[in-house]
Image: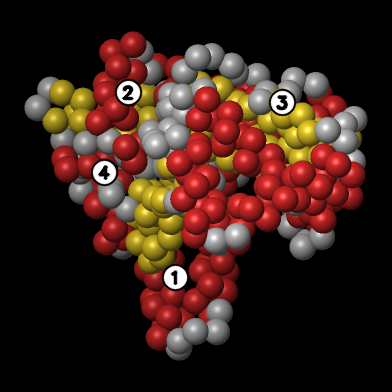
Protein backbone atom coordinates (compact mmCIF):
# COMPACT_ATOMS: atom_id res chain seq x y z
CA UNK A 1 0.00 0.00 0.00
CA UNK A 2 1.23 3.47 -0.89
CA UNK A 3 0.01 6.43 1.16
CA UNK A 4 0.20 9.97 -0.18
CA UNK A 5 -0.91 12.90 1.95
CA UNK A 6 -2.58 15.90 0.34
CA UNK A 7 -4.52 18.97 1.43
CA UNK A 8 -8.20 19.27 0.53
CA UNK A 9 -7.53 21.86 -2.18
CA UNK A 10 -5.24 19.34 -3.91
CA UNK A 11 -8.13 16.98 -4.58
CA UNK A 12 -8.06 17.23 -8.39
CA UNK A 13 -10.57 16.05 -10.99
CA UNK A 14 -9.08 12.58 -11.34
CA UNK A 15 -9.03 11.98 -7.59
CA UNK A 16 -12.55 13.38 -7.25
CA UNK A 17 -13.79 10.99 -9.94
CA UNK A 18 -12.26 8.07 -8.03
CA UNK A 19 -13.85 9.35 -4.80
CA UNK A 20 -17.30 9.57 -6.40
CA UNK A 21 -16.85 6.14 -7.91
CA UNK A 22 -16.37 4.64 -4.44
CA UNK A 23 -19.47 6.45 -3.23
CA UNK A 24 -21.54 5.18 -6.14
CA UNK A 25 -20.45 1.60 -5.46
CA UNK A 26 -21.27 1.58 -1.73
CA UNK A 27 -24.61 2.71 -0.32
CA UNK A 28 -23.01 3.26 3.09
CA UNK A 29 -20.93 6.09 1.57
CA UNK A 30 -23.87 8.07 0.15
CA UNK A 31 -24.10 10.54 3.05
CA UNK A 32 -23.30 14.22 2.40
CA UNK A 33 -20.68 13.88 5.14
CA UNK A 34 -18.75 11.59 2.79
CA UNK A 35 -18.99 13.95 -0.19
CA UNK A 36 -15.89 15.64 -1.63
CA UNK A 37 -17.74 18.98 -1.45
CA UNK A 38 -18.07 18.71 2.32
CA UNK A 39 -14.42 17.72 2.63
CA UNK A 40 -13.36 20.76 0.62
CA UNK A 41 -15.51 23.09 2.73
CA UNK A 42 -13.95 21.78 5.93
CA UNK A 43 -10.53 22.19 4.33
CA UNK A 44 -11.16 25.87 3.61
CA UNK A 45 -11.87 26.44 7.31
CA UNK A 46 -9.47 24.03 9.02
CA UNK A 47 -5.83 24.16 7.94
CA UNK A 48 -5.09 20.97 9.88
CA UNK A 49 -7.17 18.83 7.50
CA UNK A 50 -5.30 16.28 5.41
CA UNK A 51 -6.40 13.49 3.08
CA UNK A 52 -4.56 10.18 2.96
CA UNK A 53 -4.75 8.89 -0.62
CA UNK A 54 -4.38 5.10 -0.57
CA UNK A 55 -2.97 3.38 -3.65
CA UNK A 56 -2.65 -0.32 -4.48
CA UNK A 57 -0.94 -1.60 -7.63
CA UNK A 58 -0.93 1.88 -9.11
CA UNK A 59 -4.66 2.50 -8.63
CA UNK A 60 -6.37 4.62 -5.98
CA UNK A 61 -8.05 2.32 -3.49
CA UNK A 62 -9.39 4.81 -0.98
CA UNK A 63 -9.27 8.12 0.88
CA UNK A 64 -9.13 8.92 4.59
CA UNK A 65 -9.70 12.59 5.51
CA UNK A 66 -8.41 13.46 8.99
CA UNK A 67 -7.34 16.36 11.20
CA UNK A 68 -3.83 16.43 12.65
CA UNK A 69 -4.01 17.21 16.36
CA UNK A 70 -1.43 17.59 19.11
CA UNK A 71 0.54 14.65 20.45
CA UNK A 72 0.09 12.35 17.47
CA UNK A 73 -3.70 12.28 17.71
CA UNK A 74 -5.88 12.24 14.59
CA UNK A 75 -9.53 13.32 14.53
CA UNK A 76 -12.08 12.37 11.85
CA UNK A 77 -13.23 14.82 9.21
CA UNK A 78 -15.19 17.67 10.86
CA UNK A 79 -14.63 16.31 14.37
CA UNK A 80 -17.57 16.82 16.69
CA UNK A 81 -20.00 17.93 13.97
CA UNK A 82 -19.43 14.84 11.83
CA UNK A 83 -22.28 12.35 11.62
CA UNK A 84 -20.36 9.98 9.32
CA UNK A 85 -16.67 9.38 8.70
CA UNK A 86 -14.18 6.67 7.82
CA UNK A 87 -12.49 5.49 4.63
CA UNK A 88 -14.05 6.44 1.31
CA UNK A 89 -13.00 3.42 -0.71
CA UNK A 90 -13.45 -0.28 -1.28
CA UNK A 91 -14.02 -1.75 2.19
CA UNK A 92 -12.84 -5.17 0.97
CA UNK A 93 -9.38 -3.84 0.13
CA UNK A 94 -9.01 -1.41 3.07
CA UNK A 95 -5.55 -1.44 4.63
CA UNK A 96 -4.52 -2.56 8.08
CA UNK A 97 -5.39 0.50 10.15
CA UNK A 98 -2.39 0.35 12.49
CA UNK A 99 -0.10 0.18 9.48
CA UNK A 100 -1.93 3.21 8.09
CA UNK A 101 -1.42 5.09 11.38
CA UNK A 102 2.29 4.33 11.18
CA UNK A 103 2.43 5.61 7.60
CA UNK A 104 0.73 8.81 8.77
CA UNK A 105 3.24 9.14 11.64
CA UNK A 106 0.35 9.19 14.10
CA UNK A 107 -0.39 7.40 17.36
CA UNK A 108 -4.20 7.22 17.43
CA UNK A 109 -7.34 7.87 15.40
CA UNK A 110 -10.64 8.24 17.28
CA UNK A 111 -13.97 7.58 15.56
CA UNK A 112 -17.64 7.45 16.58
CA UNK A 113 -19.67 7.40 13.35
CA UNK A 114 -17.96 4.84 11.09
CA UNK A 115 -20.35 2.58 9.14
CA UNK A 116 -20.11 -0.91 10.58
CA UNK A 117 -19.71 -2.23 7.04
CA UNK A 118 -16.13 -0.90 7.16
CA UNK A 119 -14.90 -4.15 8.65
CA UNK A 120 -11.35 -2.99 9.37
CA UNK A 121 -12.69 -0.67 12.07
CA UNK A 122 -14.80 -3.24 13.89
CA UNK A 123 -12.00 -4.92 15.91
CA UNK A 124 -11.07 -1.46 17.20
CA UNK A 125 -14.59 -0.55 18.31
CA UNK A 126 -16.04 -0.54 21.79
CA UNK A 127 -19.63 0.56 21.06
CA UNK A 128 -22.13 -0.46 18.38
CA UNK A 129 -24.76 2.14 17.55
CA UNK A 130 -26.88 3.09 14.54
CA UNK A 131 -28.21 6.04 12.61
CA UNK A 132 -32.00 5.82 12.08
CA UNK A 133 -33.14 6.90 8.63
CA UNK A 134 -36.19 7.19 6.41
CA UNK A 135 -35.97 5.09 3.26
CA UNK A 136 -38.09 6.84 0.64
CA UNK A 137 -37.28 4.37 -2.11
CA UNK A 138 -40.97 3.45 -2.43
CA UNK A 139 -42.11 7.06 -2.10
CA UNK A 140 -43.49 9.27 0.67
CA UNK A 141 -47.03 7.90 0.59
CA UNK A 142 -45.81 4.29 0.86
CA UNK A 143 -43.61 5.29 3.83
CA UNK A 144 -46.51 7.16 5.46
CA UNK A 145 -48.92 4.23 5.04
CA UNK A 146 -46.40 1.78 6.49
CA UNK A 147 -45.67 3.99 9.50
CA UNK A 148 -49.36 4.68 10.17
CA UNK A 149 -50.10 0.96 10.06
CA UNK A 150 -47.47 0.27 12.70
CA UNK A 151 -48.40 2.88 15.33
CA UNK A 152 -50.45 6.00 16.01
CA UNK A 153 -47.39 8.29 16.09
CA UNK A 154 -47.70 9.69 12.57
CA UNK A 155 -51.47 10.13 12.90
CA UNK A 156 -50.84 12.12 16.10
CA UNK A 157 -48.30 14.34 14.35
CA UNK A 158 -50.79 15.05 11.57
CA UNK A 159 -53.56 15.77 14.06
CA UNK A 160 -51.36 18.26 15.94
CA UNK A 161 -50.34 19.86 12.66
CA UNK A 162 -53.97 20.46 11.74
CA UNK A 163 -54.58 21.92 15.18
CA UNK A 164 -51.59 24.24 14.78
CA UNK A 165 -53.00 25.44 11.47
CA UNK A 166 -56.43 26.11 12.99
CA UNK A 167 -55.33 27.79 16.21
CA UNK A 168 -52.21 29.73 15.18
CA UNK A 169 -52.41 30.22 11.43
CA UNK A 170 -52.31 28.45 8.05
CA UNK A 171 -49.25 26.24 7.66
CA UNK A 172 -46.61 27.13 5.09
CA UNK A 173 -43.46 25.13 4.36
CA UNK A 174 -40.32 26.74 2.91
CA UNK A 175 -37.74 24.23 1.71
CA UNK A 176 -34.73 26.55 1.90
CA UNK A 177 -35.39 29.78 3.76
CA UNK A 178 -32.73 32.46 3.11
CA UNK A 179 -34.02 35.09 5.55
CA UNK A 180 -31.25 35.64 8.16
CA UNK A 181 -33.93 36.05 10.83
CA UNK A 182 -34.94 32.42 10.36
CA UNK A 183 -31.39 31.22 10.97
CA UNK A 184 -31.19 33.52 13.99
CA UNK A 185 -34.32 31.86 15.37
CA UNK A 186 -32.82 28.39 14.88
CA UNK A 187 -29.65 29.53 16.63
CA UNK A 188 -31.54 31.06 19.55
CA UNK A 189 -33.94 28.16 20.09
CA UNK A 190 -31.19 25.54 19.80
CA UNK A 191 -28.90 27.46 22.15
CA UNK A 192 -31.65 27.84 24.77
CA UNK A 193 -32.67 24.17 24.68
CA UNK A 194 -29.06 23.05 25.12
CA UNK A 195 -28.40 25.58 27.89
CA UNK A 196 -31.36 24.14 29.78
CA UNK A 197 -29.48 20.83 30.08
CA UNK A 198 -26.09 22.42 30.65
CA UNK A 199 -24.65 21.86 27.15
CA UNK A 200 -22.87 24.48 25.04
CA UNK A 201 -23.87 24.89 21.40
CA UNK A 202 -21.19 23.34 19.20
CA UNK A 203 -21.51 26.16 16.67
CA UNK A 204 -19.97 28.49 19.26
CA UNK A 205 -16.69 26.83 18.30
CA UNK A 206 -15.36 29.19 15.60
CA UNK A 207 -14.33 26.45 13.17
CA UNK A 208 -17.68 24.62 13.51
CA UNK A 209 -19.70 27.77 13.00
CA UNK A 210 -17.61 28.63 9.93
CA UNK A 211 -18.05 25.16 8.38
CA UNK A 212 -21.83 25.28 8.82
CA UNK A 213 -21.93 28.83 7.43
CA UNK A 214 -20.11 27.62 4.29
CA UNK A 215 -22.50 24.69 3.89
CA UNK A 216 -25.47 27.06 4.31
CA UNK A 217 -24.07 29.28 1.56
CA UNK A 218 -23.70 26.34 -0.85
CA UNK A 219 -26.60 25.48 -3.16
CA UNK A 220 -25.56 23.45 -6.20
CA UNK A 221 -27.52 20.67 -7.92
CA UNK A 222 -25.33 17.99 -6.33
CA UNK A 223 -24.67 19.40 -2.86
CA UNK A 224 -25.89 22.06 -0.46
CA UNK A 225 -27.31 23.10 2.86
CA UNK A 226 -31.06 23.56 3.47
CA UNK A 227 -32.57 25.81 6.13
CA UNK A 228 -36.15 24.56 6.06
CA UNK A 229 -38.92 26.38 7.89
CA UNK A 230 -42.51 25.80 8.95
CA UNK A 231 -44.69 28.86 9.38
CA UNK A 232 -48.11 29.03 11.04
CA UNK A 233 -49.54 32.24 9.65
CA UNK A 234 -46.93 34.89 10.49
CA UNK A 235 -45.43 32.82 13.30
CA UNK A 236 -42.28 30.81 12.73
CA UNK A 237 -43.04 27.40 14.19
CA UNK A 238 -39.95 25.26 13.48
CA UNK A 239 -36.64 25.31 11.61
CA UNK A 240 -34.40 22.46 10.50
CA UNK A 241 -30.96 22.69 8.92
CA UNK A 242 -29.97 19.71 6.83
CA UNK A 243 -27.32 18.84 4.28
CA UNK A 244 -27.98 17.14 0.95
CA UNK A 245 -25.87 15.36 -1.64
CA UNK A 246 -27.18 13.43 -4.61
CA UNK A 247 -30.26 11.49 -3.55
CA UNK A 248 -29.49 11.66 0.19
CA UNK A 249 -30.31 14.28 2.81
CA UNK A 250 -29.19 14.37 6.43
CA UNK A 251 -30.88 16.18 9.32
CA UNK A 252 -28.25 18.19 11.18
CA UNK A 253 -29.72 20.92 13.43
CA UNK A 254 -33.51 20.64 13.93
CA UNK A 255 -35.36 22.82 16.44
CA UNK A 256 -38.74 24.44 17.07
CA UNK A 257 -40.50 27.41 18.66
CA UNK A 258 -40.77 26.55 22.38
CA UNK A 259 -43.95 28.62 22.67
CA UNK A 260 -45.65 26.11 20.34
CA UNK A 261 -44.28 22.95 21.92
CA UNK A 262 -47.73 21.47 22.58
CA UNK A 263 -48.30 21.26 18.81
CA UNK A 264 -45.03 19.34 18.10
CA UNK A 265 -44.19 21.71 15.23
CA UNK A 266 -40.77 20.15 14.70
CA UNK A 267 -42.39 16.86 13.75
CA UNK A 268 -44.86 18.56 11.43
CA UNK A 269 -41.86 20.20 9.75
CA UNK A 270 -40.18 16.80 9.45
CA UNK A 271 -43.28 15.43 7.71
CA UNK A 272 -43.13 18.30 5.21
CA UNK A 273 -39.40 17.78 4.73
CA UNK A 274 -39.96 14.14 3.85
CA UNK A 275 -42.77 15.02 1.45
CA UNK A 276 -40.50 17.59 -0.22
CA UNK A 277 -37.54 15.18 -0.26
CA UNK A 278 -39.56 12.58 -2.11
CA UNK A 279 -40.82 15.12 -4.64
CA UNK A 280 -37.22 16.29 -5.21
CA UNK A 281 -35.86 12.81 -5.92
CA UNK A 282 -34.32 12.15 -2.52
CA UNK A 283 -34.53 8.48 -1.59
CA UNK A 284 -32.92 8.58 1.86
CA UNK A 285 -33.37 11.06 4.71
CA UNK A 286 -31.00 10.33 7.57
CA UNK A 287 -32.14 11.38 11.05
CA UNK A 288 -28.70 11.04 12.65
CA UNK A 289 -27.47 8.87 15.49
CA UNK A 290 -29.53 9.13 18.66
CA UNK A 291 -32.28 7.44 20.63
CA UNK A 292 -34.85 10.24 20.59
CA UNK A 293 -38.36 8.80 20.48
CA UNK A 294 -39.38 10.49 17.24
CA UNK A 295 -36.50 8.87 15.37
CA UNK A 296 -37.84 5.43 16.21
CA UNK A 297 -41.33 6.50 15.16
CA UNK A 298 -40.29 7.97 11.81
CA UNK A 299 -37.42 5.68 10.80
CA UNK A 300 -38.08 2.60 8.69
CA UNK A 301 -34.40 1.65 8.41
CA UNK A 302 -31.06 2.25 10.15
CA UNK A 303 -27.38 2.19 9.29
CA UNK A 304 -25.17 0.33 11.76
CA UNK A 305 -22.27 2.36 13.18
CA UNK A 306 -19.25 1.62 15.33
CA UNK A 307 -17.41 3.85 17.82
CA UNK A 308 -13.87 3.26 19.00
CA UNK A 309 -10.24 4.10 18.35
CA UNK A 310 -7.32 2.75 16.37
CA UNK A 311 -4.08 3.08 18.25
CA UNK A 312 -0.46 2.06 18.04
CA UNK A 313 -0.14 0.19 21.33
CA UNK A 314 3.27 1.27 22.60
CA UNK A 315 2.77 5.01 22.27
CA UNK A 316 1.45 7.50 24.85
CA UNK A 317 -1.83 7.99 22.97
CA UNK A 318 -2.12 4.26 22.35
CA UNK A 319 -1.58 3.28 25.98
CA UNK A 320 -4.19 5.80 27.14
CA UNK A 321 -6.76 4.40 24.71
CA UNK A 322 -6.06 0.80 25.61
CA UNK A 323 -6.59 1.70 29.27
CA UNK A 324 -9.86 3.39 28.28
CA UNK A 325 -11.03 0.23 26.51
CA UNK A 326 -10.13 -1.87 29.57
CA UNK A 327 -12.14 0.50 31.79
CA UNK A 328 -15.10 0.23 29.45
CA UNK A 329 -14.86 -3.56 29.52
CA UNK A 330 -14.90 -3.50 33.32
CA UNK A 331 -17.89 -1.15 33.40
CA UNK A 332 -19.71 -3.43 30.96
CA UNK A 333 -19.13 -6.45 33.19
CA UNK A 334 -20.62 -4.57 36.13
CA UNK A 335 -23.93 -4.78 34.30
CA UNK A 336 -26.65 -2.20 33.52
CA UNK A 337 -26.87 1.00 35.49
CA UNK A 338 -25.12 3.56 33.34
CA UNK A 339 -21.53 2.82 34.42
CA UNK A 340 -20.42 2.00 30.88
CA UNK A 341 -21.89 5.18 29.41
CA UNK A 342 -20.33 7.30 32.15
CA UNK A 343 -16.97 5.66 31.53
CA UNK A 344 -17.29 6.21 27.78
CA UNK A 345 -18.10 9.90 28.14
CA UNK A 346 -15.39 10.46 30.74
CA UNK A 347 -12.81 8.73 28.55
CA UNK A 348 -13.76 10.81 25.54
CA UNK A 349 -13.42 14.02 27.54
CA UNK A 350 -10.07 13.09 29.07
CA UNK A 351 -8.61 12.01 25.74
CA UNK A 352 -10.29 14.77 23.67
CA UNK A 353 -11.41 11.89 21.47
CA UNK A 354 -12.56 13.13 18.07
CA UNK A 355 -12.35 16.77 19.14
CA UNK A 356 -10.68 19.53 17.14
CA UNK A 357 -8.55 22.00 19.03
- Furthest toward the left, the residue is 57
Viewer-nearest of discs 4 and 2: 2
Residue 220 image position (x, y, % from top left): 54, 14
Question: Distance from label 4 to label 2 (Cα)?
Answer: 22 Å
Residue 274 image position (x, y, % from top left): 56, 36
Residue identified by numbered label 3: 174
Question: Distance from label 2 to label 3 (Cα)?
Answer: 30 Å
Crowding near the residue tagged with mark 3, few <14, some 14–19, many ≥20 C-alpha atoms within 10 Å: some
Q: Residue at x 50, y 76 (%)?
A: 340
- Say if 295 sits above or below 344 in the image: above
Q: Residue at x 35, y 36 (%)?
A: 29
Which of 88/156 is in front?
Answer: 156
Q: Quadrant of the N terminus?
A: top left
Res. 71 in view: no
Residue identified by numbered label 1: 324
Is the residue under label 3 in contact with that under label 1 (CB below 8 Å)?
A: no
Residue identified by numbered label 2: 20
Viewer-nearest of discs 3 and 4: 3
Question: Distance from label 1 to label 3 (Cα)?
Answer: 46 Å
Q: Residue at x 21, y 25 (%)?
A: 60
Return the disc, 1 or 3, that comes first in the chain's sequence. Answer: 3
Crowding near the residue tagged with mark 4, few <14, some 14–19, many ≥20 C-alpha atoms within 10 Å: some
Is the residue under label 2 in contact with that under label 4 (CB below 8 Å)?
A: no
Residue 231 image position (x, y, % from top left): 81, 33
Return the disc, 4 or 2, that comes first in the chain's sequence. Answer: 2
Return the disc, 2 or 3, that comes first in the chain's sequence. Answer: 2
Q: Secondary structure at mark 3?
A: strand
Q: Viewed as shown, does residue 233 lie left or right of 31?
A: right
Residue identified by numbered label 4: 100
* Figure quadrant of residue 315: bottom left
Residue 262 image position (x, y, % from top left): 82, 56
Amino acid sequence: MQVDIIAAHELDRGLEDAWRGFQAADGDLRSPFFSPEFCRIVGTVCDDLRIAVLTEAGAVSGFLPYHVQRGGRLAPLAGEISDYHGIVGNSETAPDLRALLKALKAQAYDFNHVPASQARFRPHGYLDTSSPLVDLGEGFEAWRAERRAGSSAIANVERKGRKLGREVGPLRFVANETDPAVWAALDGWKRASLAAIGVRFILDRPWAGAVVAEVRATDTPGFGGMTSALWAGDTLAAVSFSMRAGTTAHSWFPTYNPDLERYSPGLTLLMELLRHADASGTTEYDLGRGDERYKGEFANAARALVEGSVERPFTPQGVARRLRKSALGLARRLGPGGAEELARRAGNRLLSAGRLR
